[in-house]
Amino acid sequence: MKTPYYAVIFTSVQTQDTEGYAEMAQLMEDLAKQQPGYLGLEHASEELAITISYWESLEAIANWKANLDHLDAQKQGKERWYEWYKTRICLVEREYDFIRK
């Protein structure tokens, strides 16, 4: 990805009610991929789940947050799937990586 771009970091602790969660998570990932300004997503899950999505602009993030299907998923998350969550929005100014060959 070309810098700068934005990262939305969503950390959460889930409830014991996991019915329908995986399907909704996949639906939201598929829907996010269709949004203008979407750049990618990474996810890790154990006791603390971390999902990071990447976006071209703050406007693209705001549009995703206001998406009606995403709003429904947020509502269900608060009612059923999350004990706690936090969202952080960060500007990524540079990046680098390592690849073993």
Image (cartoon, grey):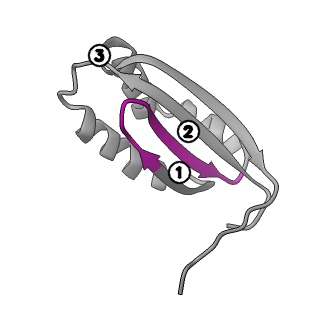
Q: Earlier in the sequence, mark 2 or mark 3?
A: 2
Q: Are marks 2 and 1 in contact (CB under 8 Å)?
A: yes
Q: Nearer the viewer, mark 2 or mark 3?
A: 3
Q: Earlier in the sequence, mark 1 or mark 3?
A: 1
Name the residue at the front extreme: 100
The residue labelled by disc 3 is 80
Label 3 residue SS? helix
**Label 1 neighbour load within 10 Å: few <14, some 14-19, many 20+:** some
Can you give x and y, in whole percent of width and height, for residue 55 in the image? 64, 51
Q: Main secondary structure of the magenta part?
A: strand
Q: Are marks 1 and 3 in contact (CB under 8 Å)?
A: no
Residue 2 lies in quadrant: bottom right
Residue range (magenta)? 43-56
Amino acid at the residue labelled 2: Trp
Q: Are marks 2 and 3 in contact (CB under 8 Å)?
A: no
**Horizontal side, residue 12 vs residue 46: left or right:** right
Residue 35 numbered tag: 1
**Horizontal side, residue 85 vs residue 8: left or right:** left
User: CA gap, disc 2 to disc 3?
Assistant: 21 Å
Q: Does the magenta-highlighted stretch encompass residue 5?
A: no
Q: Residue at x 44, y 48 (%)?
A: 43
Q: Is residue 47 above or below residue 92?
A: above
User: CA gap, disc 1 to disc 3?
Assistant: 26 Å
Q: Residue at x 70, y 54 (%)?
A: 56
Q: Earlier in the sequence, mark 2 or mark 1?
A: 1
The residue labelled by disc 2 is 64
Residue 22 lies in quadrant: top left
**Label 2 neighbour load within 10 Å: few <14, some 14-19, many 20+:** many
